Amino acid sequence: MIDYVDVVAGLCWGDEGKGKIVSHLCSQGNYDIVARWGGGSNAGHTVFIDKKKYKTHIIPSGIFHGVKSIIGPGCVLHPESFFSEIQYLEDNGFDTSLIKVSPYCHIVTDDHISFDKNNLAAKLGTTGKGIAPCYASKAARTGILAKDVLEEKFIWDEKLKGKILCEGAQGVWLDINQGLYPYVTSSETLPHAACSIGFPIQKIRNIWGCAKIYDTKSGKDPRFPKDLLDVPVLKALADLGEEFGVTTGRRRKVNWLNLDLLIKSLQITGSTHLVINKCDIMEELGIFKLFHKELMFFVDISQMKAYIEEHIRRNCPLVNKIIFSSSPEVV
């Protein structure tokens, strides 16, 4: 029997700190299962455990806390990358027997990766990990399922019970339906898509929406022109925040927070909790700006936080709690 489901989702373009929130929630001992519902190894989560940094790409962050970690049927998996990640976790002392893959998760092949690198990466700024071609094969009903490739010990029996935490990949503005097409990912990133793991939407208790106090984007998007990389103050912000993609190592484009889009993504996702990360980075920069209809300036971080909270409370009645986080380790 399922007790309840909590969901952690990105509210922007990914890279918002979802892994940290999943790790923090799991550290409280409140979950029996952590499940990922979409994407593949094109995503990445950075997690700090006892001040040591760990990175994963497809395996949910529950693994760092001894929680059963499931890769759901809406995900796509490249076996070689998966086994490499398993080895990395074993080498660091984590119990990889807790990792299970839905039998209906689709397999990324070398042909998918080759097509991505040769036809999509330069044009759309994809990671070249074969994700879009794999989802195309899935939609065409020509895909390969995990149950036909992986050893039985990795295959999930698809039984859900207890307290479940769902881990999102990417963010709202990369969602294939809500993002700026074609500069999107190939899966659904909104929290409702977590139901594809196999539970009714009525079981969702809390939705943890995650953002940063400034915006970042990996890859191409007209809203993040290349010349942002050359703006000195934004470059300084990127350097302070160590804004490099976990999967690709690419420097992320950085811009001031777009509060209009954040409010819209909160409304779309129905987030009950909002975590705004990297407030310490903005404070270290010492320059406080955001977009809300126009570019706005603030004298300090407290004034900026108060303004953000006021307008979110006014426009997003489903948000019960707002947390401004300045720690890379905990919420």
Image (cartoon, rainbow, N blue to C red):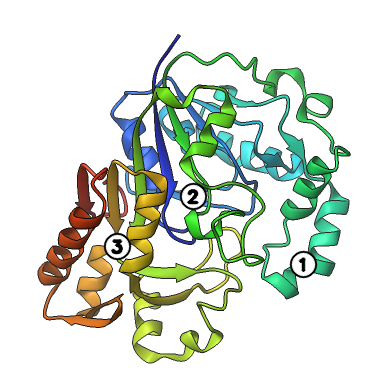
Q: Residue at x 77, y 67 (%)?
A: 120
- Residue at figure coordinates x 67%, y 70% from the top left: 125
Which callout, 1 or 2, points at the residue further toward the start of the chain?
2
Q: Is residue 26 left or right of residue 246?
A: left
How busy is the neighbourhood of tag 3: few (under 14 within 10 Å), some, or many (20 plus)? many
Question: Considering the numbered disc 2 on the image, is that residue within a helix, a strand or a loop?
Answer: strand
What amino acid does circle 3 point to?
Answer: Lys
Judging by the rendered image, the residue that carries numbered circle 1 is 120
Amino acid type at mark 2: His
Which residue is label 2 attached to? 45
**Whole-percent x, y for residue 323 in the image:** 21, 50
Q: Could one spot residue 243 in this view of the protein?
A: no
Q: SS at mark 3?
A: loop
Q: On the image, numbered disc 3 is attached to which residue?
A: 278
Q: Is residue 88 left or right of residue 173?
A: right
Identity of the residue drawn at 70% across and 38% down: 83
Q: Is residue 208 above or below residue 148?
A: below
What amino acid is labelled 1 in the image? Answer: Leu
User: Dividing the image into 4 quarters, which one contains the N terminus?
Assistant: top left
The tag on residue 251 is none
**Relative depth, front residue between 238 and 132:** 132
Residue extending farthest to the top is 1
Q: In the image, what residue occupies the spot 52% across and 22% down? A: 199
Q: Earlier in the sequence, mark 3 or mark 1?
A: 1
